[in-house]
Amino acid sequence: MGTLALIGLGSNLGDRKANLDGALAALSGTPGIEVRAVSSFHETASVGGPRGQGAFLNAAAALEVGLSPPDLLRALHAIEAGARRLREVSWGARTLDLDLLLFGDQILDTPALLVPHPRMAVRRFVLAPLAEVAPKAVDPLTRRTMAELLANLDRRPRYLALANDGAADLFSRLVAELSAVGIHRGRQPSDREDLEILEQRARELRADRWTTDLWGDRWVITDFWFDDLFPLARARTGDRDRDAQAMTGRFYAARREVLEPTFVVLTSRNPWHSASEPLAVWARRTHPDAPVGCETPILRVRSQALETIVVEVLAACTATGPG
């Protein structure tokens, strides 16, 4: 019995259907790979990259493989090369794109390979085909199924949380670009104000305030992630047991009422995250101060450059919507 691997297929150059059919045939003919299921083909507008690109034809396939993740990735790259795929422009037009999305329940973070795919959970053109071939397959980072991740993109309002202290420049740019409703955390609280800050933000983010009738399809953006307010405050409280217990109890009570982000942005600009723990660890929410596991998709942008981060986040927001 091999390992379940989920891959995404895409093409927006040449005979797109023939390109995808050829890739599936090549996969079937590769030793160590059995194609178990293939989704329908989905036509999707290109997201990110140079303007003027043609629409993509996207699909997903469930594979049973006897290969290691690096060997499977090499096989995918060989099939892309056979289709004359060129890697000259990021998010550029291509004859064939094959992405390794999931490999069993493994979490891999190496310079050559990131699994699960770092943008899978925010891309409708990836999740819609995946939900056809493997709706119950589980993303090991969020512990949500493919069907649940797809349903997350349908929730309204769409809510983006920035897990970045001091991200005022990014926050203001995104609010302007998306014509979003912005909620600012405000000044850094003192120890005795931590509980009040938590509860104030909880009131602002109560899910019953953000109805579709009032806000429609607008994005909500915060320059904080509610889940992060707890470990930041808890770190200042330290070992004062009474304060810590009160804060924990109020946090859990408040968290049940707040709006859940569609996704969270985590960048390497944040010293609280990147200096104390690797991004991959924070994405799994295994920090000792984290009171809860994270079912929220996290977009990790491995850059400190504002423009790069803005482009990545705007592309992700676009990708959550219908193509």
Image: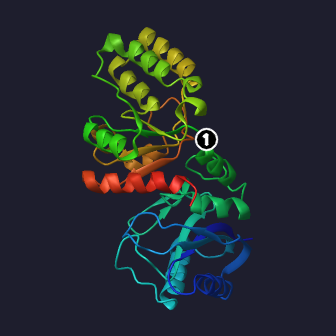
Q: Is residue 122 visible?
A: no
Place of residue 311 in the rendered image (x, y in percent of width and height, measured from the top left): 34, 56
Of residue 318 and residue 196, the one placed in the foreground of this image is 318
Quadrant of the frame with the C terminus: bottom right
Q: In this view, does 150 lie above or below 81?
A: above
Place of residue 24 in the rendered image (x, y in percent of width and height, measured from the top left): 65, 82
Question: Which three-letter amino acid code belongs to the residue tagged 1?
Answer: Arg
Within the image, what quadrant is residue 273 found in?
Answer: top left
Identity of the residue drawn at 59% across and 47% down: 153
Q: Is residue 106 above or below residue 211?
A: below
Place of residue 172 in the rendered image (x, y in percent of width and height, measured from the top left): 30, 39
| Image label count | 1
Place of residue 107 in the rendered image (x, y in percent of width and height, measured from the top left): 53, 57
Q: In this view, does 119 lie above or below 297?
A: below
User: Dot 1: few (<14), some (14–19), or many (≥20) neighbours within 10 Å?
Assistant: some
Q: Is residue 233 visible?
A: yes
Identity of the residue drawn at 30% across and 57% down: 308
Kind of element beneath mark 1: loop
Image color mode: rainbow
Within the image, what quadrant is residue 129 found in?
Answer: bottom right
**Residue with the mark numbered 1:** 155
Identity of the residue drawn at 44% across and 74% down: 53
Is residue 116 toward the left or the right of residue 273 in the image? right
Identity of the residue drawn at 26% across and 51% down: 306
Quadrant of the frame with the N terminus: bottom right
Of residue 177 and residue 296, the one placed in the foreground of this image is 177
